[in-house]
Structures are given as C-alpha cells and as structure tokens.
Image: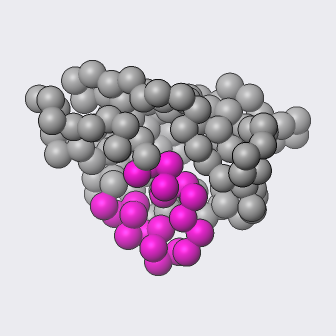
Amino acid sequence: MTADIDFTAVAERYIATWNETDPAARRKLVEALYTEDGAYVDPLVVAAGHDAIDATLGAVQGQFAGLVFTLGGPVDGHHNLARFTWNLGPAGEEAIVVGFDVLVLTEDGRVSNVHGFLDKVPAGL
C-alpha cells in the first residue's frame, strides 16, 4: 500500500512544519503535508483541519520562541504508519521537551492523523 513512501522524508517534512516561523510558508507546508481533514492529537491539544493544525504550530512557536524541533533518532515505519522521537530545545543543546509521534499516512504519503505523546516536559507545562 505505501511501499514507496520514504518514512524518514515524511518525518523530516513534519518536523519542518513545526520549525517554520513564517506564517505563510508554514501554512503552505501544512497544506502540502496534511490531508484536508488531517488531525493532530497529543495530551495538550486536539487540532483537526489545516486551520487548527496551523494555529497549534503557531501557538507552540510562540510559547517556545527560539527553540527548534529535531528528530531524536531513526524513523521506523511500516504499512501506513511512521513513528519517531523528536526533541525541542536550543539548537545544539539538550532538549527541554521530548516527544514520540505516530503518523498515519495516506497512500500518497500525506498525513491523515498524528498521535503525539510527551515523554519529557518542563514543570508547569
């Protein structure tokens, strides 16, 4: 079904949407990556559709200004699923937030759902 999908490339595009600070450029990335009815869910937020996902990314960037998302290791994938750990922190320094996401992909490699988990969070978040 998704034999030709490069799971690492999809995860890298996903991380890029979290790091894009220009609102217009970020919106284009969101629209290219997610299906129209795509959804993102983690312990702190539920966002369905491009508008809500884009707003969530903007809010996180505002809360963690100057920090960057990076992949925390290799991307594992099979069928229409990709999973990976990500880090958020100052460039080149220890992450202050660490998470684990599972992406549900369509046949063309777009994201239909994200199931996010937070493994390490700062106090008070």
Name the residue: 61% across, 48% down: 69
* Residue 42 visible: no
* Residue 114 visible: yes
Name the residue: 15% across, 35% down: 4
Name the residue: 78% across, 43% down: 93
Vertical placement of residue 44 versus 67, above or below: above
Vertical placement of residue 72 versus 28, above or below: above
Vertical placement of residue 121 versus 45, above or below: above
In this orientation, which residue lies closer to the viewer: 85 or 53? 85
Q: Which span of residues is magenta-colored?
A: 13-32
Residue furthest front in the image: 92
Dominant secondary structure of the magenta stretch?
Answer: helix
Q: Is residue 8 left or right of residue 70?
A: left
Name the residue: 30% across, 61% down: 32
Vertical placement of residue 100 versus 56, above or below: above
Q: Is residue 69 a member of the stretch shown in magenta? A: no
- Residue 38 in percent (x, y) is at 35, 49
